Image (spheres, rainbow, N blue to C red):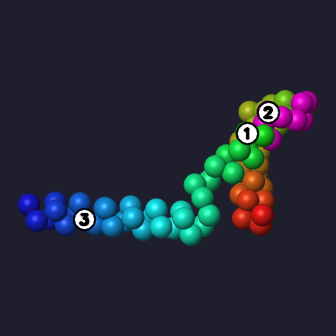
Amino acid sequence: MNDNKNMSLSLVKDELNINEMVEIQGGSGQDVANCISDAYTNHGWISVALWVESTFIQETLVAVAADCTVHDLCS
């Protein structure tokens, strides 16, 4: 019984630490999500090409996400 209680307290502590880190890092990632959404929807034929390329080359999405993350961290 005590093991379960200790595990629950540990999980709550870990969750608090994660929440603190999110606040320290400056947000929940919404800016990154908005950037990715913008890249895939608001640039006409470039967005269409990005969708098609992402279908065949999955690393494209990783590259877009990385670019948006770096842009968010630097702004």
Find numbered disc 2 in the image and state the secondary structure of the residue it sits on.
helix
Question: Where does the magenta region start and end?
Answer: 39-46
Q: Is 53 situated above or below 72? A: above
Q: Residue at x 73, y 39 (%)?
A: 37
Element under label 1?
A: helix
Q: Is residue 12 above or below residue 59?
A: below
* Image coords of residue 40 (percent x, y): 78, 36
Q: Which amino acid type corresponds to the residue marked 2 in the rendered image?
A: Thr
Residue to which mark 2 is pinned: 41
Q: Are marks 2 and 1 in contact (CB under 8 Å)?
A: yes
Left or right, residue 69 beside residue 2: right
Which numbered disc covers residue 9? 3
* Earlier-in-chain disc, 1 versus 3: 3
**Dot 2: few (<14), some (14–19), or many (≥20) neighbours within 10 Å?**
some
Q: Are marks 2 and 3 in contact (CB under 8 Å)?
A: no
Three-letter amino acid code of the residue under disc 3? Leu
